[in-house]
Amino acid sequence: LGNGCSVCAVKGGKSVDTSMGLTPLEGLVMGQRSGDLDPSLISFLAEKLQVSAEEVTLILNKKSGLLGLSGLSEDMRLLLGEKENTRAQMAIEIFCYRLAKYIASYIVPLGRLDALIFTGGIGENAEPIRQKVVAYLAPFNPKVLVIPTNEELVIAKDAASIVRGKR
């Protein structure tokens, strides 16, 4: 969870489902991306705003999500500091609700919810977000882990493995 967000269901060490689709627009609410929405919304907004479908797609990818909901910022740190701003608080609530809803939907392919693993800038550093999501999922009593992300190290190790011919 960061400016881009995704969730993955893992069973037996293998991914069985993910929130990402053909494009990163599918899935969770993100910093600037809307996440899942009704496909008819594109033509509705194009007509309502008198813009092309391409412009609506740009809006959904660059001017929506936390930024569009809050009318303030895509930065969760800033939104968390805006205690009196109702739009900022609404954006946080929608973000947490949609995240918890996605996670809960993965109980079907998993059969149960053993653990929640939070990573990324928001996942690692935004304790209020973790608390809200865990509260939604409390009936399933998952173990909660926070694991620091080091994407650069993973990329470097994978690249070294490829160079050595081990992949």
Image (cartoon, grey):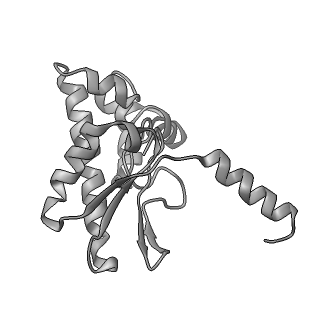
Residue 70, image x, y percentages: 29, 27
Viewer-closest of 106 and 27: 106
Viewer-closest of 91 and 111: 111
Badge count: 0
> Most extreme residue toward the left, as rendered?
139
For residue 17, what is the image quadrant? bottom left
> Most extreme residue toward the right, as rendered?
164
Q: Residue at x 35, y 55 (%)?
A: 145
Asked if residue 13 is positioned above or below residue 121 in the image, the reply reads below
For residue 141, what is the image quadrant? bottom left
Q: Residue at x 80, y 58 (%)?
A: 160
Asked if residue 60 is positioned above or below residue 146 in the image, the reply reads above
For residue 27, what is the image quadrant? bottom left
* Left or right of residue 33, residue 159 in this image: right
Asked if residue 107 is positioned above or below residue 141 in the image, the reply reads below
Q: Residue at x 65, y 54 (%)?
A: 154
Where is the C terminus found, in terms of image quarters?
Answer: bottom right
Viewer-closest of 109 and 154: 154
* Left or right of residue 151, residue 148 in this image: left
* Left or right of residue 72, residue 84 in this image: left
Residue 8, image x, y percentages: 43, 63
